[in-house]
Image (cartoon, grey):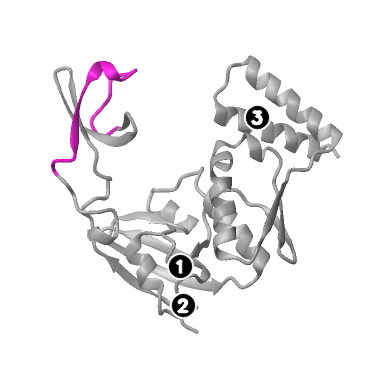
Amino acid sequence: MAIKPGDFIKVSYTAKLEDGTVIDTTIEEVAREHGIYNENARYGDIALVVGEGHVVKGLDEALVGKEIEFRGEVVVPPEKAFGEYDPEKKEVVSITKFKEKPQPGQRVRVGEKVGTVERIIGRRVIVDLNHPLAGKTLTFDVEVKERIEDLAEKVKALFLIATGIDVDVVVDGKKAVVNLPKGAYFNQYFTIGKFSAVNAVFKHLDIEEIDLVEKFTKEEEKAIMEAVEEAKSEGEEEKVKEEKVKNKIDEEKSGD
């Protein structure tokens, strides 16, 4: 059966520029081979809902009509990837607006926008607000691995897409119980993304109630609070706090 909009599927891909430079991949071995491996990235097949913009528009559209187990190349022009390059989309910012002196090529935030430092002239910083891949034609080597049919797996996929966190899901009739990993609420991406996940579940699936459950035992609660207090006392950043909490929980589990 051909893939259609709204289908839940799993794919793997490797994205390249026209000169063959690999810029993104879901495959860890390929990332390492081409020097783009990121230890913080999640590798492996990705779940998506066709037509919902979970990948660039050109690839999203190209998946429609393909069969499960399709393997092939998809060429995506700039207008269906990250847009055409706009030479006027630049901003001049005083160097005093930055905490540290910026460097050409550095990604910086300008108000609500993010751009790349193009050059520095005296005390003025020219920031290019185009996406780094604007104007680029991309080629995807893509493989469609499977269609997701199980309702609980679909809920799980939507939470992973929106929050980046793996959850366990049990569906009972039209109710989904989403069991969260320890420390989920310390993750800022989860805190923001959970609302998108919930809305996506209600939009795409015949679910009328969602329970988000984060279960604690007395010992685990004690470990978490100790980690939080320690992080606060050391004035650590949010990401470091989250990692410290996770490590503390893992220590408790290994001691059981």
- Can you tell which of label 1 and label 3 is closer to the viewer? 1
Q: Amino acid at mark 3?
A: Lys
Q: Cβ–Cβ below 8 Å for labels 1 and 2? A: yes
- Label of residue 244 in the image: 3
Does residue 95 sit above or below 217 in this rendering?
Answer: above
Q: CA distance from mark 1 to mark 3?
A: 37 Å
Q: Is residue 10 left or right of residue 33?
A: right
Q: Amino acid at mark 2?
A: Ile
**Going from the N terminus, do you reach mark 1 or mark 2 first?**
2
Residue 177: give x, y in percent of width and height: 73, 55
Q: Cβ–Cβ below 8 Å for labels 3 and 2? A: no
**Going from the N terminus, do you reach mark 3 or mark 2 first?**
2
- Can you tell which of label 3 and label 2 is closer to the viewer? 2
Residue tagged 1: 50
Magenta span contains residue 13? no
- Magenta residues? 87-106
Query: In which quadrant is the C terminus drawn?
Result: top right
